[in-house]
Image: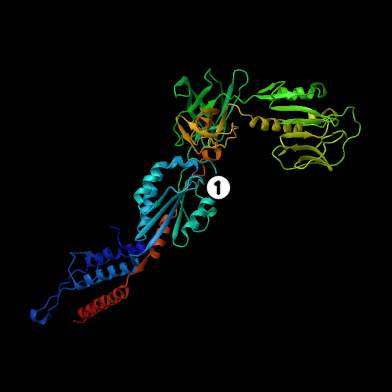
Amino acid sequence: MMPDLSFAHPLAGALALLGIPAVIAIHFLQLPSRPERVSTLFLLNHLEPESRGGRRLQRLRQSVPLWLQLLAVLLIAWLLAEPRWLRPDSAQAVLVVLDSSVSMRAIEQPLRTRLPDRLRALARSAAKTEWLLLETDPAAGRLYSGGRLEELEATLARWRPRLGSHDVFPALRLAQSLARDRGLVIFVTDRPAPGALPPGVELLALGQPLENLGFCGVRASSEGLGGWEALVRNYGTRPQTRRWWLEDAAGQRLGKPETITVQAGRAETLRGRFPDAGSIQLVLEPGDGFEFDDRLPLVRPKPKRLRVQVEGTAHFGEWLETFLDGAPALDRVTEAPDLVIAHYDPLAPKLPEGPSLVFVRNPAPATNLLKGMVVAERDPLTSGLSWDGLLAAESFAFPAKPGDIVLLWQGTRPLITRRGPRLLIGFDPANSNASRLPAFVLLLHRFTEAVRAEVVATETANVETNQSLRIASGGAALRVWSGEKPEGLPGLPRAPFEPGFFEVREEAEGQTKVVRFTGAAHFADAREADFRDAASADGIATAARRQRERHSRQDGLTPLWVLLLGAVMMVNWGWQERRKSS
């Protein structure tokens, strides 16, 4: 049964108890007896043995002052410790918010041992405790809600953090709103940041610095024989040497292990080629306490093929051929295209129906340049592009229509416009320097890739864990499959939280499942893999004492103990005076 008694200042009471050995030591020290010669015994008064202070250690003698002084020390210790009695009707709510960052996997063992110990201490702060276990992943919901601490511990044992770097404040504010006035919010993490937490949130940090070495990035190519490059980074403060090897998708080792040495704070690159199977796993020998970045699954990329039809090739010149040759996975076709590239004819102003790139073409070279400042609107196609130095000759323009989205202006004239699935280029590249301007070439590549993303076809790619996937489907729901089990919700494709191979299938009721995406998810969050700022901090002890004082009452007999202490001191003083006078 939970004890009802606690002390507001146990340390002060413990220090006061040191008076007991002090009193006993004083009574051990007695003055030696001095012999006095007398002629007869009847001249001596009858006296009881008297203990007086001195420097000679003698046998401890039982006496009334000894017991009175010991009782006084006990009363002083009791009053200084300030006993409090738990109210039987007291109740509290404790909300535990777990940091969902994947770096928490490095402290799984301390989390399952130290956190329950701290929660048991909190449970003794009230007669009844209601528990609520949350995590900072907004999609997770409540992990546990109830009054049994054992069930909370069982839930904690099954919990696995899975997010990268993210904002924890929304979850903490939600916990504060649920706690209201009578609740206590505890944030459990591996990186203490007390100054950044909302007021009223107690911190329990269980982290410690680690000399971590792991994979932090990868690049794979589908060209030629298909090669890969993987980056291994040392996040620690001293050089590290580790073995590494290759495995196939089933976990069978390929070839002999090799050794890599990485200096502190540096990164090294591993290179190789894909086998015929096209799927491999790079594995680092574990040994740093964080194994989440020691395995890197890879697949040989196979992007979706983009079918492109070019109308009037002779009018574009060499720049278009150079652009098309630089675009990956592109096929030139004459029918059923995914993207049409054409010129605009004002005498026959009909535009292609589907996704298309439409350029203005001047029938004769122009000598006058467009005037005015070139200004880009905010749009994913123009983000981060610099248009300084663009020179374009005067020409006729596309007639404006409702719904047009102008991406680039020169003065008041639209230069580049989006109209539905079409991108309208309002100048002739042959009469400008646009083909030599990086911003223009990047804009065309971005539009081409946006068109490719809408093509319904199968592709293979490497992605990061928990990455949102943009996959075109034939109208049925998409579902992520990792091994033999589905993950997440239908229609919301995201890469798995755990590194590994997966598929995205299009699932229509009553039809065969169609694989739309095959991929490998790898961990590449450098901030989560860096444990140099990990540390420990514990604010629960203070919170437990504050909660205990809130849900308990002072000892009602305190005035009686004060009077008793005064009486004991008076009796002890009176006893000493009586012996001196006798």
Q: Is residue 38 left or right of residue 315?
A: left
Element on which disc 1 rests: loop
Q: Is residue 248 above or below residue 131?
A: above
**Camera sees residue 85:** yes
Image location of residue 363, percent across then percent down: 88, 27
Using the image, determine if residue 298 lies above or below residue 524: above
Q: Horizontally, is 83 left or right of 301 in the view?
A: left
Decide: is 368 above or below 314. Answer: below
For the residue pair 324 and 510, the one nearer the viewer reads as: 510
Quadrant of image for the C terminus:
bottom left
Q: Amino acid at mark 1?
A: Asp
Q: Residue furthest right?
A: 367
Q: How many marks?
A: 1
**Badge 1 local density, few (<14 within 10 Å), some, or many (20+)?**
few
Q: What residue is shown at x 73% (from left), y 24% (from top)?
A: 309
Position of residue 329 measured from the top left corner of the image (x, y, whole percent): 65, 23
For label 1, the residue is 167
Q: Position of residue 448 (x, y in %)?
A: 70, 30
Q: Quadrant of residue 303?
A: top right
Of residues 110 and 446, the one drawn nearer to the viewer in this rendering = 446
Where 189 sits versus 92, above or below? above
The quadrant of the picture occupied by the N terminus is bottom left
Residue 357 versus residue 368: which sits nearer the camera?
Answer: 357
**On the image, which quarter does residue 72 sit in?**
bottom left
Relative to 233, 310 lies left or right: right
Q: Where in the figure is residue 216, as x and y percent of width and height?
A: 55, 33
Whether residue 523 is visible here, answered yes or no, is: no
Residue occupying the point 10% across, 82% down = 43
